Amino acid sequence: MEEALEGNLELKEIQRLEGHSDRVWSLAWNPVAGAAGVPAMLASSSGDKTVRVWQQSGRDWDCVAVLDEPHTRTVRSSAWSPCGKLLATVSFDATAAIWKHAGGDFDCVSTLEGHENEVKSVSWNASGSLLATCSRDKSVWIWEVLPGNEFECVSVLQGHTQDVKMVQWHPFLDILFSCSYDNTVKVWAEDIDSDDWHCVQTLGESNNGHSSTVWALSFNSAGDEMVTCSDDLTLKIWKSEIQKQQVGDGYAPWKHLCTLSGYHDRTIFSVHWSRDGIIASGAADDAIRLFVENKDGQVDGPSSPSYKLLLKKEKAHDMDVNSVQWSSKETRLLASASDDGAIKIWKLESIS
Amino acid sequence: MSEKFSATLRISDLNDFIAPSQACIVSLKGLKNPEKAAPAAKPPAIGEPVKISLKDCLACSGCITSAETVMLEKQSHEEFLSNIESGKTVIVSLSPQSRASLAAHFGLSPSQVFRKLTSFFKSLGVKAVFDTSCSRDLALVEACNEFIARYKQHNSATGEGCKTSLPMLTSACPGWICYAEKTLGSHILPYISSVKSPQQTIGATIKHHISKKLGFAPEEIYHVSVMPCYDKKLEAARDDFVFSVDHHGEADSEAGELRVAEVDSVLTSGEVLELMKLKSVDFKALEEAPLDKTLTNVDAEGHLYGVSGSSGGYAETVFRYAARTLFGTQVEGPLNFKVIRNSDLREVVLEVEGKKVLKFALCYGFRNLQNIVRKIKTRNCDYHFIEVMACPSGCLNGGGQIKPKEGQSAKDLIQLLETVYMEEVSVADPFANPLVKQLYDEWLEHPGSKKAKKHIHTEYHPMVKSVTSELHNW
């Protein structure tokens, strides 16, 4: 696979999905669709107050659902539950909605109120038992999923000092990550003693962190590395000895590994790490960039990894690229969303 | 300053004026990109960057600004001392939670703390030191009476009010009230008990009744409460707790009518400790002064008494009273509160002939409060009564309490406070409190009377979201 990345590569636009009447903020691939005969499925959230669900049909993509209720303002993002049957959407109307996907239909089965204002991001944990949301009200909420589409608030976390842009659960541990306009990434874990959640680590400028808004984060497939992207025009890679934590050896702190600077000259809004190790970034310069670990001539050994730009797709969109998301099933398939209102599906291919 | 308030209050956007809130409409432009830098063709421009004035803040429902924060700074010990010097009659009302905080800090009993504090305050020139356990008993009697009325209304199944009469939610926690008014509004406010908190009950009692007995006009008294909680300062500043007096009928048209607060100032437990440091007082070495019996739960032998719940004992007191009054059941011994999700969500049930007839809950901390609110909104709440407190672990864990000592965990301190709270304090039924009886005999007539409604009850106001706070385009 790694070899295949050698030579000339191109990001080929294979589909352009039109339908939203305002900017598209974020994308979410259904994690169980796109394999074993189940057609791939993608949800897009937009400033037009709707979520559209797109499904692959042969070479084409159809919009199979437009979720235009109950949100009364911009839908900022959405997330599929690990089983792919529930879709959580969050909106600037301060609510989250939970949709059940059954027999091709989407039914809104629950709404979650509580945030004071705009909800920015939502994430399910690996088992689908917990849901996290974050908001401009500076708080991060954790909800427990109960039978009968009931949700109970298990924690309200108030560590950030500004707007929280994104929440993301670790791919297999129940540890929550949040990033914010306060320039930090915070790591949250449950304290069994007090039966509540606490901030166990803050990655800020003083520990080689970002010097401006952190917009997004993503994990590698092993879950031991994390990439963050920022308004400070850099990507940063972080590492944790997560195996230690898995065997119950206490919290394994995240350490700064390297910074990818000099590649971006506008805000980086989105970053996503593919299962086969390619980091995609979407930025305010309308471009998509791909990075891979540079394994050539590692004279310093594995302790000081570096990353190289694999390719830069100029003018990927007409306006800011708000979201880049690799397909969870099909390798080398990337989706992007933009302020220009379009969603694009890309295939990373060798130039023949 | 803002971090001192309860988390519940903070979630409803207590923000500093110097660093305007993300929710502050006026600051939206001209700051670092709020959601993202706005390219020219994007949503309608809001216009020129606007300067925020204090007036804008006060007129806005968006956040509690440092305008209020500044106002709160005035409720400090400097203000307290200057009022003593100005010759006002200063009365202090001490909460049992603050008493426990100081007792744990100094390794003394609540009774010793109360007596030593009395000598300390009197050495500064304070006229009397009272006990909010006493006014709390009065508030509890009113709450019992209100519950029975709500229960009957609920079961009469007629009239509009019956749908929102139960569950009855307690009103003693100002963080909760502020949150309910700002964020929950008319969905929740009708369920909240109209009874004033112990702080405001003692304030009303002192300014409306005791002042007369002492021969002072209400405005001649400067009344300070000592509380475990910063949010109590906001409560004291509420318009509902300020009243007008005619200036002795004197035709002083310049002065007109006077506005008098039930509680002029609130000091937290921690601020009292600071005050003692400021005065270089060796607290443990202070004499134990006799207590002022007018509004203090102390018996003839000098023993303190009160209800046992460290957050006011509302659920317990009303539960026992309702069991007795509605079902003729005398509940003996301590109540068996069962932990539901965590130690801050507990419930107690009364069964009569195998049927669950009463279901009460203690609900502390913001996360539990959220779930209760959610249940009420979706009409899935089967509790009859809920004692709501914004802070996890309740009032002993208030933001104004003295911080843990070095090496002491917050959890250890709470456990210590829970033990100290009732040390050498005997458990007593509020209905048997002779001081409460006397207040009804001399002043309020009977529970739920017109006079009681006027002085010991209050109302709540949904905060209408201003147009501007809804103006975000991002």
Image (tube, coloured by chain):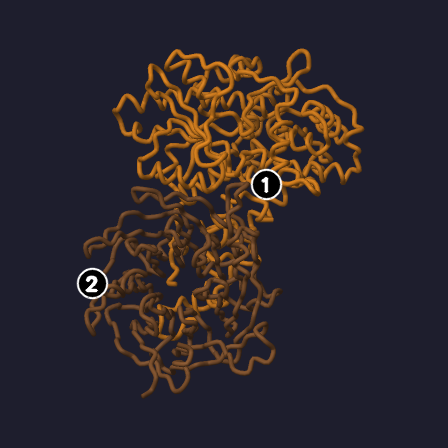
Q: Which mark is drawn over residue B399?
A: 1
Residue B136 placed where, x, y %?
A: 54, 24
Q: Residue at x 49, y 25 (%)?
A: B314
Which sits in the foreground, A5 or B381?
A: A5
Identify by letter the chain in orange. B
Above/below status of B203 relative to A122:
above
Res. A216 in view: no
Labels 1, 2: front one: 2
Above/below status of A23 relative to B311:
below
Tell me the amino acid under the disc marked 1.
Gly
Residue B184 placed where, x, y %?
A: 39, 42
Residue A76 as seen in the image, left or right of residue B130: left
The secondary element bearing badge 2 is classed as strand
Residue A140 placed where, x, y %?
A: 46, 52
Q: Which mark is drawn over residue A64?
A: 2
Q: Which residue is drawn at 60% across and 21% down?
A: B210
Structural crowding at the residue carrying mark 1, measured as other residues with C-alpha within 10 Å and reported as few (<14), some (14–19) or many (≥20): many
Identify by letter the chain in brown. A
Q: In which quarter of the image is residue B276?
A: top right
